[in-house]
Image (cartoon, grey):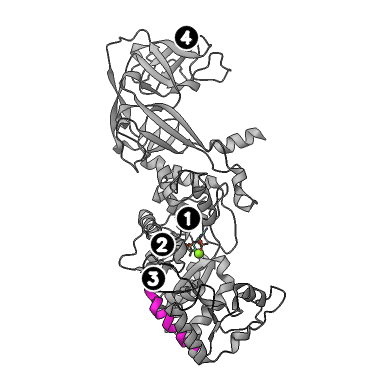
Amino acid sequence: MASDLTAANPRPNFIRTIIDENLAAGKHHTIATRFPPEPNGYLHLGHAKSICLNFGLAADYRGTCNLRFDDTNPEKESAEYEHTIAEDVRWLGYSWEDRYYHASDYFEQLYGFAVQLIKNDCAYVDSLSANDIRAFRGSLTEPGRDSPYRSRTVAANLELFERMRAGEFADGAHVLRAKIDMGAGNVNMRDPTLYRIRHAVHHRTGSTWHIYPMYDYTHCISDALEGITHSLCTLEFEDHRPLYDWVLDKLQLPCHPQQIEFARLEVNYTITSKRKLHALVTEGLVESWDDPRLPTLKGLRRRGYTPTAIREFCERVGLTKKQTVIDMTALETCVRDDLDVSAPRAMSVLDPLKVVIEDYPDDTIEMLDAANHPKEQAFGVRQIPFARELFIERDDFMEDPPKKFHRLAPGKEVRLRYGYLITCREVLKDSAGRIVELRCTHDPASRGGHAPDGRQVKGTIHWVAAPTAIATEFRLYDRLFTIPDPGARDDFREYLNPDSKIVACGFVEPSLASLPLDKPVQFERLGYFCVDPDSRPGKPVFNRTVTLRDTWAKVQSSKE
Ligand code: ATP
Ligand code: MG
């Protein structure tokens, strides 16, 4: 993938072409977009694509992008969701400045427009049951039939609609419908519902309203009232576009935004359906909305994904009209690329094996220089303690190694990163035969890890000095699902990966005792990590964001 295609140097796409043409033709002088989430759940990667697209285009064209909550379903929505969504948009790096809106800001105007439609004989109150409305709608192959209430007089409709607003009727007793064409080929145009009765408390308007407008009716009018030029939405709304245009045409609003559809972002091995994410959280299949295994922005953030990586990912996947599924490795590559540059290095041991350097004094702690970044000198150098007792990674030792094993083995010499060359002299085991300790010697002339006589020592391993090591919990994550397309299966729950979270108890070097949240670190050879909010003073918890290389592809191909 071409890496010069960053947000600063965007890839051309069909929406940019349309905007460029509109601007060249003088249709607009600038652009206005919006991101319109429903406050009924947490934002996920798919939403990130829409956020980056809408806010990104506005920034590139020096236009504006509004944040607008599409809050027309009071039973499912809450102020908490709204708050988290706004926080996530800001975290991704975007600002709506003073353009923070709600569909509910327009409830009174929306009502007025509905009255206008009724007066123009473009809308009527229907009193069929929900079941009958469905039956009368017909199917893809059969036209619908007119409701017997379709011919109500304007006066009767106005009176009923007003009484619906006043709360005189039970939920479902009546609906307001657009009067379009029950024979239309496009089912969305068969007299779609504009308003329904809901005796529900809304998180912003309380119990002021007993009727709530439908999405299709609300969205186009909200766009028009805000002076949106390009209303970007996902492909499933293509068939709704005629209705979007119909409402605006009938109301003759001065602004008529252009709806343009693009393919949703789908990533394999995960799900980006709000309903299914809800199920995972409420059924306890993951721990919370910010579980680091989820593709929610809160989960990705807790996992250690950076806004830069997510924005770059959205840019790299590009924009099309054709639905595709993006490989999870593309996302992982983006975060690796970003963290490689931005994360300082440090050492930790996930699965500790004790090493005693027999010829090193036991009352000495020596400070050694360690570079914080292999390429970026600006990261500086830190001091790491070295001592007689150390921890190394258990799998960096093999008692009976194969030929190409360049790490520690009996009689073999290995380099301790930034430390000394050590040779394994003896292996101590417990009564069950498990290795509990290695006795080693060191070459005092190799301080810093350099062989004094230029002899070849192939292996370099990481380590932590035992006396100053900080006991740490590491949470190692893998894909949440075992198959690429869990969302397409009857029950995605059956494909949850039982090893998606593994907890390891090890050690980090003391410089990591109090790393702030949101600060990445690369533990040498192990991957990129970040501090989890579950950390307590003296007891850090680290989440692995991603391994250093794509180990997953390797495991898969070795299985084949
Ligand atoms: P719902 O079924 O609740 O409507 P939704 O995922 O569409 O779910 P919204 O809050 O309505 O959620 O989405 C806000 C915006 O994000 C919409 O413009 C929607 O088109 C866009 N969006 C949602 N999912 C994706 C996705 N996977 N890829 C790109 N854009 C998306
Ligand atoms: Mg939606």
- The CA distance from mark 1 to mark 4 is 52 Å
Horizontal and vertical percent for residue 258? Answer: 49, 75
Q: Nearer the viewer, residue 383 or 485?
A: 485
Q: Nearer the viewer, mark 2 or mark 4?
A: 4
Report the magenta residues as a range.
Answer: 103-118
**Which badge, 2 or 4, comes first in the chain's sequence?**
2
Q: Amino acid at mark 4?
A: Leu
Label annotation for residue 1? none
Query: Mark 1 packing: few (<14 Cα in 10 Å), some, or many (20+)?
Result: many
Q: Is residue 114 magenta?
A: yes
Question: What SS does tag 2 mark?
Answer: helix
Say few, some or many: other residues with alpha carbon within 10 Å of mark 3 (under 14 / 14 to 19 / 20 or more): few
Disc 3 target residue: 207
Find disc 1 in the rendering and name its residue. 314
Ligand 1 lies under 8 Å from the Cβ of mark 1: no
Quadrant containing the C terminus is top right
Residue at which label 4 appears = 428
Of mark 1 and mark 4, the one earlier in the sequence is: 1
